[in-house]
Image: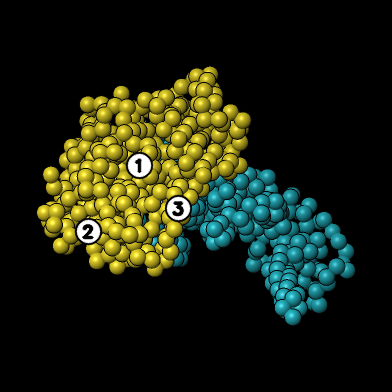
Chain colours: A yellow, B cyan
Amino acid sequence: MGNITLNQITKKFGEVEVIPPLDLQINDGEFVVFVGPSGCGKSTLMRLIAGLEDVTSGNIQIDGRDATETPPAKRGLAMVFQSYALYPHMSVRKNIAFPLRMAGMSKEEQDAKVEAAASVLNLSAYLDRRPGQLSGGQRQRVAIGRAIVREPAAFLFDEPLSNLDAALRVGMRMEISELHKKLATTMIYVTHDQVEAMTMADKIVVLQAGVIEQVGGPLELYHRPRNTFVAGFIGSPKMNLIEGPEAAQHNATTIGIRPEHIGVSTESGTWKGRVGVSEHLGSDTFLHIHDTGLCDLMTVRVSGEMNVHHGDTIYMTPEADKLHRFGPDGLRLD
Amino acid sequence: MARAVTQKRKLIATLAAWTIGMAIFFPIFWTILTSFKTEAEAISDPPSLFWFDWTLENYGVVNERSNYPLHFMNSVIISVGSTVLGLIIAVPAAWSMAFVPGKRTKDVLMWMLSTKMLPPVGVLIPIYLISRNLGVLDSRVALVVVLTLINLPIIVWMLYTYFKEIPGEILEAARMDGATLKSEILYVLTPMAVPGIASTVLLNIILAWNEAFWTLNLTAAKAAPLTAFIASYSSPEGLFYAKLSAASTMAIAPILIMGWFSQKQLVRGLTFGAVK
């Protein structure tokens, strides 16, 4: 079981309030991603759940029991750290077995569980090595192995992939998702990378300055961002946010349109601009458009290649049903 | 050009290092040399370097007049005992200062260090009287306790510096893995700090072995370590330079040998914080 409920929790570091009163419900078996810009309090929130930091007020329930005062060792959660935090003086085997040893499990049982975890994570050949002799990806797997042998109520991942190179990151992302499907255990995952959030999560929690901006499934956040912050944060490249008379025409203070929801033509269209930098990704091309009179820089996506050059004039037409409208308080209208 | 300069610098640095090294080692060398001379030759002017009648007579006399094994054992017990006791106190103390510092941690550290600036003679009378009243004068226990207290600030400081180098996330990982505070310190922190702890232990044994003020003042015969054994040959009534040298050589030989074999560890430990 892995239900986690946060009731009105707050956290202050000295005089600074990092987390104003916050409520959150995490259901058993969910893959929840905390995402937000640096310093938004997402890591702090996870450390509060882990028990590595004490809440200033409010309470935390794990499986219906009040765990606010429970020390981290007794919460039944397992954590994977950004730096892996492996024990450098122990072999891989001993690293993975450490939580079992702490739980007072017999040597035979420990060995069986370590072997099982190692085979799941492709670590069987490395069990007698020290962490220092492993690559980044392998170390990450050891850290995950150490977490899964405990059979925790929930896994906590604190930016686990940010120390890996791009190719490995994609691979590990799949492995963690795969693991979640297999174990069906609650996972809480902190990242600043919205691609990780979109691809892995059942539920995304978007945070800014300790405040939850929106909670929802990846596509819900993509299609119906609750406010301009979420609209700008989720999606890559960013949504174009337009203010002024153009927005007023749609009875809104701000309108948003994603780069992939704009039709492009060299002859005619609703909006007009001048092509700046083009980013060619092969499958897509992103054009950065200047001098639209709508916003500083507009981004549009074009499928495949398009024969435009720096300085060319271009016309754009937004797909009307894909327009997002936001009111003066930044909240979504309709 | 650049190459020539480095060569020349290297030569100068090497010469300087050897000169300083020799200057530091000379008194020890001279003591060892003197221990093989007769009393008359020990004070001859000009002093003779190698061309004298080498004799083991002094070692024979010293062994006859004093109970070397007893003093040796006292030294071992006092230096090892005070180091072990010191570690038992200092490891948790340094842990808390390094990983859960409070508002006053820095002040506590400075205050501990400041006790080392106090001339020991300032507290001689109270400590002497306390020892006497407790009936522990001239006992190993008293010396172990006193030397532990004397060297504790150094042990705590050294361990604190080493512990600071250990990433806190690893200890947090241990906590998440279900380790109690005791297991965290015993199975994770201590093994990771082994190089630092080892050099702390070595340094502390050397300091305790050579400590003379308290060992001379708080012992008479039973608990007297090697420092007192040396001192017993420095009498105002006669000339015993050769015997004094023989006693000194016998007293410093064990620690010199230990230091020689562990020098790599010592240097690594002492420069640990500096290079990393």
| Disc 3/disc 1 C-alpha distance (Å) | 29 Å
Q: Residue at x 55, y 30 (%)?
A: A122
Q: Nearer the viewer, residue B219 or A227?
A: A227
Residue under disc 3 on the same chain as residue under disc 2 = yes
Q: Residue at x 61, y 55 (%)?
A: B268
Question: Mark 1 = which residue?
Answer: A197
Q: Nearer the viewer, residue A33 or B180?
A: A33
Q: Using the image, determine if residue B89 lies above or below residue B260.
A: above
- Quick one: label 1, few (<14), some, or many (20+) residues within 10 Å? many
Question: Quick check: marks 3 and 1 in contact, CB under 8 Å?
Answer: no
Nearer the observer, disc 3 or disc 2? Answer: 3
Left-right relation of A182 to A314: right
SS for callout 2: strand
Query: What's the residue type where badge 1 is placed?
Result: Ala
Image-quadrant location for residue B53: bottom right
Q: Using the image, determine if residue A52 lies above or below residue A16.
A: above
| Number of marks | 3
Query: What's the residue type where badge 2 is placed?
Result: Ile
The chain under label 2 reads A
Is tag 3's residue or tag 1's residue first in the polypeptide sequence? Answer: 1
Residue located farthest toward the front when viewing the structure as drawn:
A267
Question: Mark 3 = which residue?
Answer: A305
SS for callout 1: helix
| Residue B146, image x, y percentages | 47, 51
| Residue A292, image x, y percentages | 27, 65
Residue A95 appears in the figure: yes
Mark number, residue A242: 2
| Disc 3/disc 2 C-alpha distance (Å) | 26 Å
